[in-house]
Amino acid sequence: MTAQVIDGKAFAAEVRGKVAEHVARLKEKHDLVPGLAVVLVGEDPASQVYVRSKGKQTTEVGMKSVEHRLDADTSEADLLALIDTLNKDESIHGILVQLPLPKHLNEDLVINSIDPAKDVDGFHISNVGLLGTGQKSMVPCTPLGCLMMLRDHHGSLSGMNAVVIGRSNIVGKPMAQLLLGDSCTVTIAHSRTKDLADVVRRADIVVAAVGRPAMVPGDWIKEGATVIDVGINRIETEDGKTRLVGDVDYESCAARAGAITPVPGGVGPMTIACLLANTLTAACRANGLEEPEGLTA
Ligand SMILES: Nc1nc(=O)c2c([nH]1)NC[C@@H]1CN(c3ccc(C(=O)N[C@@H](CCC(=O)O)C(=O)O)cc3)C=[N+]21
């Protein structure tokens, strides 16, 4: 079998098209422009990749984009003061603080100071609790993007065996919650999981989110399974250049899977599209307006 390639780049463009349409309607009918503020502290390289396309795409769909770049040695008090200002700013509906933060800043404290209604990353403890209990929340962008691709490919996910490799708060855990919400039988595997190969071999859906280049070989994949590769690892090639690879060994996994997301061009673009979708959702909720369909969990 050769896997169908799930084109995240094309799907993300479709999602952005829907967002743009809805944004245009909000502007026309309600004179409302959704606004997204991104706060970047210091110069983490992974965050740079992300910020590059993000501001451009935000304005492309007709939303307001604000960027706050702070020095790496910014104090916690100063960062909290900025978040407080953004919380109170009615033109801002979404606030994203780029992670990781420099070590002297308490990440949990900072994230939990964001107004949960503006927490477009879905990382605030209130949103985590709402998602975990099946209530309306802001859903983390990467898992939301993965869910959209899975729903698009399969229709219903009900009863499928899903294995999530990775237990991070930003991908693994919320991904598992979303799959559970769609009635999958969910296993969360991680670095200490015994017989990981056998666990993965049972999966109809494999979501790899560990951050280790090509750590899932093709012979772990059940024939016909769907493989969602969340990893974005920059590795050095023999000729001294760098290249992006995922957490799964693409060639060997594609040879066995029914469908697979590539890296780049898979989950990454969907993450940004979902950030825009979440900002739109937040703006609608803040104004008591109908939410866009198919852009939330
Ligand atoms: N609070 C917070 N929320 C985040 O969502 C967040 C963050 N902090 N910090 C940094 C990471 C990184 N991240 C990426 C998203 C999309 C691509 C993406 O679109 N990648 C392209 C490739 C880009 C390239 O070519 O270098 C792709 O996979 O096709 C990459 C990285 C979001 N992050």
Image: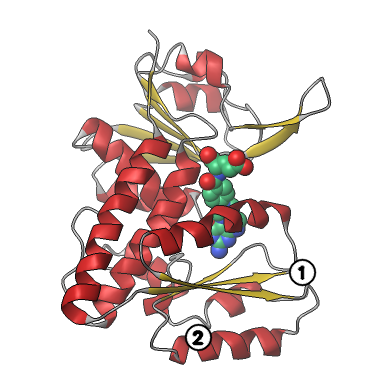
Image coordinates of residue 183 in percent, x first then y, are: 23, 44
The circle on residue 201 is: none
Looking at the image, do the residues carrying marks 2 and 1 touch, with CB atoms under 8 Å apart?
no
The circle on residue 103 is: 1
The kind of residue on which mark 1 rests is Lys
Image coordinates of residue 180 in percent, x first then y, are: 30, 47
Q: What residue sits 75% from the left and 84% below the top?
A: 75
Instruction: From the image, tell me which residue sits under label 2.
Output: 86
Looking at the image, which is closer to me, 67 or 132? 67
Q: What residue sits 47% from the left and 27% below the top?
A: 199
Image coordinates of residue 153 in percent, x first then y, are: 27, 31
The kind of residue on which mark 2 rests is Leu
Looking at the image, which is closer to me, 13 or 250? 13
Q: For residue 243, what is the image quadrant?
A: top right
Q: What residue sits 32% from the left and 32% below the top?
A: 161
Image coordinates of residue 202 in percent, x first then y, are: 39, 23
> Is residue 42 shown left or right of residue 92?
right
Q: Is residue 280 above or below residue 237?
A: below
Q: Is residue 117 above or below residue 61?
A: below
Q: What residue sits 41% from the left and 37% below the top?
A: 8
